Image (cartoon, rainbow, N blue to C red):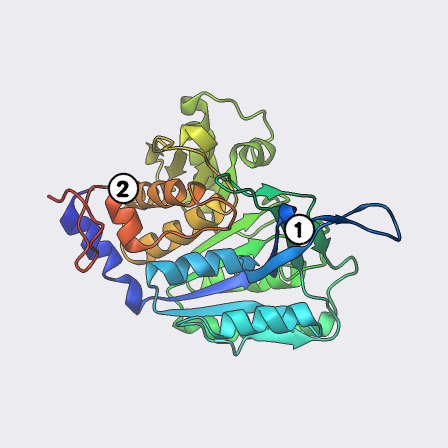
Amino acid sequence: MNSQRFHEITDAYPALRIGILGDFCLDRYLEIDPARSEISIETNLVVYNVACVRSQPGAAGTILNNLVALGVGTLFPIGFHGDDGEGFELNRALASTRGVQMEHFLHTAGRRTFTYTKPLLLHPGKAPQELNRLDFKNWTPTPEDVQRRLASSLEQLAPSLDALIIMDQVDLPETGVVTQTLLKTVARVAETYPRMFIIADSRRGLQGFPRVSFKMNLAELGALSDSSAKTSIETIRQQTADVARQNGRPTFVTLAELGMVGSLPDGTTVHAPSLPVRGEIDIVGAGDSVTANLTAATAAGATLREALQLASAAASEVIHQLGTTGTASVPQIARLFGLVVPGDRQSIGGV
């Protein structure tokens, strides 16, 4: 990608209005200093002393963080948090983020706040060591009144959006934001606004989702195609094209070290190889950075190939950020292309 196209695309980001419908969680990191460990008198077990606690929005919030890092102008989280301390932290973190409009992020006593608690052992000169995670989830169906309020929010926002992201993060169906009620509303929005870019990602797979753009990994593609997804790029390209044709929308498949494949409904298919690894990596958050960059780039007028190139570069930047759920800014992405961003002293090369 040359400098002119890079800037034409990324310069459009501040004017974009993007909705993020899905499961927002709190990522809470507990930084443990092993030098301060002690033995409990009561249990005779090791006591880990937490030296620092840091929190940030996760799941759909990670996508939002990446959109903020890209400089997208206005963001609308559509989801919920519970009546608990984690909900207070999550709501405060989102509300204090530039460009985020909170009118459609619901506070409800009928749900607890989805939380990933990540204990990290810190060792000097080494990457943090993550211990067993402690999760807080909902195990009962999302109340109908919460579903109706979320559906109403989506219908209110849809006419003003340039793009919509759907992020289904829960393990148990109907316990999060993306319920069948919400998917019916998404289907109506997609039919009413066919030119809006709408992309969906679900950790349980996208079977039963309406005809929007799908973002999947290789295993999810195989399940959706009712076949064993193989590592042959040509086979993957064909399967991706089939899904795009059926949905009438662009489709994207992430392939880890093999890069990404994208296809348009007309059969145009592009394979974007991954960038070389530059040291130790942490893949947490890479998929969410891909979703954010595909969305922003496509909404800003990027071609299929350009959107894949930008998303691949963003993922490369994120996986090299250790011990956190990272993001990739426009200057960081530019550096991977060897381009110069005005005001970024670290940019190299240039054209």
- Residue 73 place in picture, x, y as percent: 34, 69
Q: Which residue, given by chain and number where applicable, does mark 1 sit on?
A: 36
Q: Nearer the viewer, mark 1 or mark 2?
A: 1
Q: Answer above or below: position of 25 versus 108.
A: above
Q: Amino acid at mark 2?
A: Leu
Under circle 1, the secondary element is helix
Crowd class of label 1 (few under 14; some 14 to 19; many from 20; radius 10 Å): few
Q: Answer above or below: position of 199 versus 150.
A: above
Q: Amino acid at mark 1?
A: Arg
Viewer-proximal residue, 168 or 93? 93
Q: Give the alpha-carbon distance from disc 1 to disc 2, as whole Å.
A: 40 Å
Question: Is residue 100 rendered to the left or right of residue 167?
Answer: left
- Marks 1 and 2, the one that precedes in the sequence: 1
Q: Answer above or below: position of 267 versus 331.
A: above
Residue 21 appears in view: yes
Q: In which quadrant will I find the C terminus?
A: top left
Residue at 47 percent across and 30 percent down: it is: 239
Residue 151 appears in view: no
Q: Quadrant of residue 252?
A: top left
Under circle 2, the secondary element is helix
Q: Which residue, given by chain and number where applicable, does mark 2 sit on?
A: 336
- Residue 231 place in picture, x, y as percent: 48, 22
Viewer-proximal residue, 59 or 158? 59
Q: Answer above or below: position of 256 versus 290.
A: above
- Residue 66 place in picture, x, y as percent: 42, 56
Q: In which quadrant will I find the N terminus?
A: top left
Residue at 52 percent across and 22 percent down: it is: 230
Q: Quadrant of residue 142?
A: bottom right
Question: Is residue 291 rendered to the left or right of residue 144?
Answer: left
Viewer-proximal residue, 90 or 31? 31
Residue at 51 percent across and 50 percent down: it is: 324
Residue positioned most to the left: 351
